[in-house]
Every structure is written in structure tokens, then in C-alpha cells.
Image (cartoon, rainbow, N blue to C red):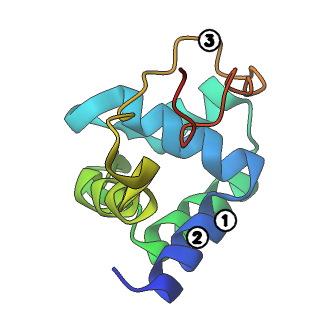
Amino acid sequence: MEILTAAELLAALGHESRLAIFRLLIEAGQEGMNASAIGEKLALPGATLSFHLAHLTRAGLITGKRESRFIRYTAKYETMSELMAFLTHNCCQGHECMPKRFSGPVDAKPVAPSSPPNEVEP
């Protein structure tokens, strides 16, 4: 992945509503969710939701498939995996530190580690 592509993906996720949509679709799995269910779950008005769904689709983070009158959206896991691999390439100078599972509430603020990952304790 090129740095410009990674920057575009991160910019698309850099908005609170788009990040919430993406996380919701990640949790929904391959089944995905239709737009009205996403809007209901996140309390987003239709026009706002459409704008953010279109942005995430253009960025290549989600995909939509028409089912009758509805569009079912799913996360593009391959794009997410490529971005994660790009971000963690040569992480911690070869020391095993990944993956760390997030266990807090969705809106929790990140907690700083007790020691930087590059430091080795005596």
C-alpha cells in the first residue's frame, strides 16, 4: 500500500460518524447491514448517513449491494487488513507486540502504555 492511499483511508475514517459506521459494519460481519438499520443504530439522519456511506464507499472501505429497495453495506475486510499491515509494518522493531485486542467501551479514550514498546525492562 502506498502512503497516499493509506492517508486517504485514514482521512475517510477521521470523522466521528464515518468511524462509527465503519466500526458498526466491522461488527456486523459479512452479513452487513442495510442503510436504515445503520441510521437507526447511530441516530443519523438519512441525508447525513448517505453522505458518509458514499464517502466510505469511494474510499474503498465499504461496499453496498442492492437488495430489492434497500442497499446492504458491508465492510471491506481486505482493505482494512491492508491498512493495518501498512500501519504496523516493522512495528516495535521486530519485538512481538501485536495484535492487542480492544476491550473497553467503544467511546473509551485510549490508555497510554506503562512503558514505550521499544524499551526493554531489566
Q: Looking at numbered disc 1 in the image, what kind of residue is underneath it?
A: Phe
- State which quarter of the image contains the N terminus: bottom left
Q: Residue at x 39, y 36 (%)?
A: 26
The mark found on residue 55 in the picture is 2
Q: Nearer the viewer, mark 3 or mark 2?
A: 3
Left or right: 56, with 93 as reference point? right
Left or right: 120, with 97 as reference point? right
Label 3 environment density (alpha carbons within 10 Å; few <14, some 14–19, many ≥20): few
| Gap in angstroms between the C-alphas marked 3 and 2 | 28 Å
For label 1, the SS is: helix
Give the residue at the far front of this rendering. Answer: 122
| Gap in angstroms between the C-alphas marked 3 and 1 | 29 Å
Q: Which residue is mark 1?
A: 51
Looking at the picture, does residue 88 appear above or below residue 110?
A: below
Label 1 environment density (alpha carbons within 10 Å; few <14, some 14–19, many ≥20): few
For label 2, the SS is: helix
The mark found on residue 104 in the picture is 3
Identify the image quadrant of residue 86.
bottom left
Q: Looking at numbered disc 3 in the image, what kind of residue is underneath it?
A: Gly
Identify the image quadrant of residue 8.
bottom right
Looking at the picture, does residue 90 appear above or below residue 1?
A: above
The mark found on residue 116 in the picture is none
Camera-nearest residue between 31 and 12? 12
